[in-house]
């Protein structure tokens, strides 16, 4: 059997991310041999994984790296780990001539067969996609031309020496860019869609980055770069639910799953949704509504980080909290919500609520939270002493829509 080779690098603390990456790969690609370069992952884990992978015509190989060789490598950002430098050993530790390396904050959402068929010129040692924020290359996805790379028997040691420089701007990635300057083949951005840069782009007001991200359609490899990871309690980047979709897959589903589009949305079970934008933690009767409406997806967003009183609402299965929401996500929430709940206290987002009312969608408010929108016939005010009446009104909305 001709295997296609994928190299991964991680330690045991990142094991669930490794498994998620592997599941996503095998949903769309067959006959994969994974090599996992690591310092501390137990033998039993590899045995368990190979029990799963055997049924998918694939396997994973343990490649241990001496952690002492990495301990003095420079880490330029808090969310990074020295084990990232283990990728320098891929030509030495992985026997295949062509190896696709994937960071473990990546999911694969389509076939990546063309990467294994990539041809290199005599001078090209590897292939990477350009960073979304600058002209350098991002090393989250690398196609290694091992035939060329093995010409230098001391490659890993030479690169590790460069990694000890405390002036490195971006750790191992800077080393890769500097060491292989002029020897890197360009990869299309669809093979390294740096969606994790969403937050940085908006925070820095980098419209050029936003435009680059928006120009990538149907990405095959999705990279949650930077520290805004989808497995954090909260994140503001796009495609958070897609990562959780792959994470949640049982190994029995992987390989023959056809990836229906609807199943990618983990909120599919909620037929109806509400939305509230707030600038405070005070939201009228919110927990009573959450508990009374388990079939409704209740979405709450804020332009700023949120405090505990809002954050704790995410413990309910039918609630999603969006801290530091960005324009693209706000527009998505508005367009996909059936009802707006004007139940936040203090600032009212007049233009937003007026736009919803003008679209003939219903807006519900309590008497203590209402804004100045009473002239609209679809703006409904309910007494704070009649929370059950709000619940009934939403259930009546369900019934009226079901009749259509």
Image: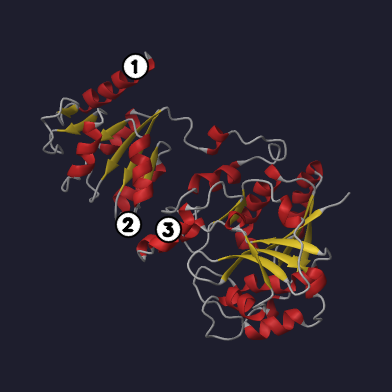
Residue tagged 2: 305
Q: For the residues labelled 2 and 3, say whether their Cβ atoms are less than 8 Å apart.
A: no
Q: Is residue 284 visible?
A: no
Estimate how packed mark 3 is, as few (under 14), some (14 to 19) or many (20 or more) residues with alpha carbons within 10 Å: some
CA distance for labels 2 and 3: 21 Å
Residue tagged 1: 399
CA distance for labels 1 and 2: 36 Å
CA distance for labels 3 and 1: 41 Å
Horizontal arrangement in the rendering, residue 283 relative to residue 314 (left or right):
left
What secondary structure is marked by label 1?
A: helix
Q: Is residue 178 visible?
A: yes
What secondary structure is marked by label 2?
A: loop
Residue tagged 3: 210
Above-or-below relation of 367 to 83: above
Residue 43 x, y percent position in the rendering: 77, 59
Residue 32 x, y percent position in the rendering: 78, 51
């Amino acid at each position: 059997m001709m295997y296609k080779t994928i190299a991964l690098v991680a330690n045991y603390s990142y094991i669930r991310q490794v498994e998620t990456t592997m599941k996503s790969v095998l949903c769309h690609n067959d006959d994969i041999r994974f090599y996992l370069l690591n310092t501390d992952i137990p033998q039993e884990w590899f045995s368990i994984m190979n029990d799963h992978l055997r049924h998918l015509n694939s396997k994973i190989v343990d490649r241990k790296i001496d952690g002492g060789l990495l301990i003095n490598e420079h880490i330029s950002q808090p969310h990074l780990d020295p084990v990232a430098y283990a990728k320098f050993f891929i030509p030495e530790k992985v026997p295949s001539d062509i190896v696709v390396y994937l960071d473990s904050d990546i999911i694969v959402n389509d076939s990546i067969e063309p990467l294994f068929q990539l041809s290199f010129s005599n001078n090209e040692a590897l292939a990477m996609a350009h960073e979304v924020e600058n002209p350098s290359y991002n090393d989250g996805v690398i196609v290694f031309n091992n035939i060329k790379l093995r010409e230098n028997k001391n490659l890993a040691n030479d690169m590790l020496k460069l990694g000890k420089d405390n002036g490195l701007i971006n750790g191992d990635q800077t080393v890769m860019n500097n060491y292989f300057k002029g020897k890197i083949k360009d990869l299309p951005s669809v093979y390294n869609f740096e969606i994790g840069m969403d937050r940085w782009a908006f925070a820095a007001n980098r419209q050029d980055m936003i435009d680059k991200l928006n120009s990538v359609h149907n990405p095959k490899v999705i990279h949650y770069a930077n520290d805004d990871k989808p497995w954090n309690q909260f994140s503001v980047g796009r495609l958070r639910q897609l990562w959780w979709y792959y994470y949640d897959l049982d190994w029995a589903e992987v390989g023959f799953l056809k990836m229906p589009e609807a199943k990618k949305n983990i909120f599919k079970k909620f037929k109806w949704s509400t939305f509230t934008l707030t600038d405070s933690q005070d939201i009228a009767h919110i927990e009573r509504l959450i508990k009374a409406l388990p079939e409704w997806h209740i979405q709450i967003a804020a332009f700023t980080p949120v405090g505990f009183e809002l954050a704790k609402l995410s413990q309910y299965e039918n609630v999603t909290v969006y801290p530091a929401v960005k324009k693209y996500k706000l527009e998505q929430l508005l367009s996909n919500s059936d009802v707006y709940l004007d139940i936040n206290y203090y600032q009212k987002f007049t233009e937003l609520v007026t736009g919803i009312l003008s679209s003939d969608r219903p807006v519900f408010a309590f008497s203590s939270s209402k804004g100045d929108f009473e002239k609209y016939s679809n703006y409904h005010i309910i007494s704070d002493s009649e929370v059950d009446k709000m619940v009934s009104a939403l259930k009546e909305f369900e019934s009226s829509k079901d009749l259509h």
